[in-house]
Amino acid sequence: MDIATIIGLVLGFGAIIGGQILEGGHVQALLQPTAALIVLGGTFGATLVSFPMPAVLKAFKEALRAFLPPKTSFEQTISNIITYAQKARKDGILSLEQDAKMAKDPFLHKGLNLITDGTEPQTFRDTMEIELATFEEQAKTSPEFFEAAGGFAPTIGIIGAVLGLIHVMSNLSDASKLGEGIAVAFVATIYGLITANIICIPISTKLKHQNKELVKDKMIILEGLFSLLAGENPRFIEEKLKAYLHEKGKGSKDDEKKK
């Protein structure tokens, strides 16, 4: 469970509701089913028009990653690659056939299969880079879906507010209800802004961050297996791959030395 997502949602909704209460308003004033129907229905209706159904289903499925992020351990990936390199150096490339069958990551599975099939190093790199590029392209869809929804939501909220005002203006004969009617109309605008800025856009941003981590994990696999295939020393491979872990750390240390 991603605790940051839980805290963020609680803090975001808590701040809005808390602010409403501190201003002397009632929470019930924010609960408008009609406004919710207009905003949510309109937002995701417009988004459905923008994306094919497979992409829509995939996006809703991957939205769960905001709460249950994929488990990626760069250290474990490097450790596995070094184990493969040591095994190949000792028993030969073909000794990795069983490891290829046991690999759960499709990218790693394909890489090990190419190696045990006797693929040339450059052909291996070209093939795996295509696989990586394809993964990156497919991974963009879900964040783009929620980013688009976040763009539509405020506009749909305004539409909801206008519809509410039309209803108010058609009942001007009862002046005592004008204030309440206008307040209800603008709840749709609030719903639109909340949907965009607390739900959709944050989910899109989190998925993008997670995708970067997944791509980085695959880059480590690609570089490690390529080095293995090229016959490099396992210790050298380990030092090379560890550079992916310490890029930020190295930058800060270099800055301190310059100072």
Image (spheres, rainbow, N blue to C red):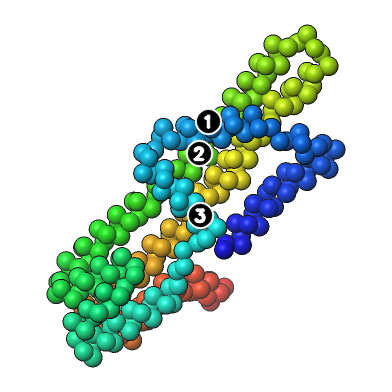
Label 1 crowd (10 A; few <14 / some 14-19 / many >=20): many
| Amino acid marked by disc 3 | Leu
97 over 35 or under it: above or below: below
The residue where tag 1 is placed is: 42
231 over 56 or under it: above or below: below
Q: Residue at x 30, y 60 (%)?
A: 132
Marks 3 and 2 sit apart, C-alpha to C-alpha, by 16 Å
| Amino acid marked by disc 2 | Ala
Label 2 crowd (10 A; few <14 / some 14-19 / many >=20): many
Residue 149's label in the rendered image is 2
Q: Which is nearer the N-term, disc 3 or disc 2?
A: 3
The answer to whether residue 138 of the structure is visible from this angle is yes
Which residue in the rendered view is the most extreme toward the top? 173
Q: Residue at x 41, y 45 (%)?
A: 57
Q: Nearer the viewer, mark 3 or mark 2?
A: 3
Quadrant for the N terminus in the image: bottom right
Picture coordinates of residue 158 (x, y %)?
Answer: 61, 27
Which residue in the rendered view is the most extreme toward the right? 24
Q: Nearer the viewer, residue 114 or 244?
A: 114
Q: Which is nearer the N-term, disc 3 or disc 1?
A: 1
Disc 2 on helix, strand or loop?
A: helix
Q: Quadrant of residue 22?
A: top right
Relative horizontal placement of residue 195, taking residue 18 as reference (left or right): left
96 over 91 or under it: above or below: above
Q: Which is nearer the N-term, disc 1 or disc 2?
A: 1
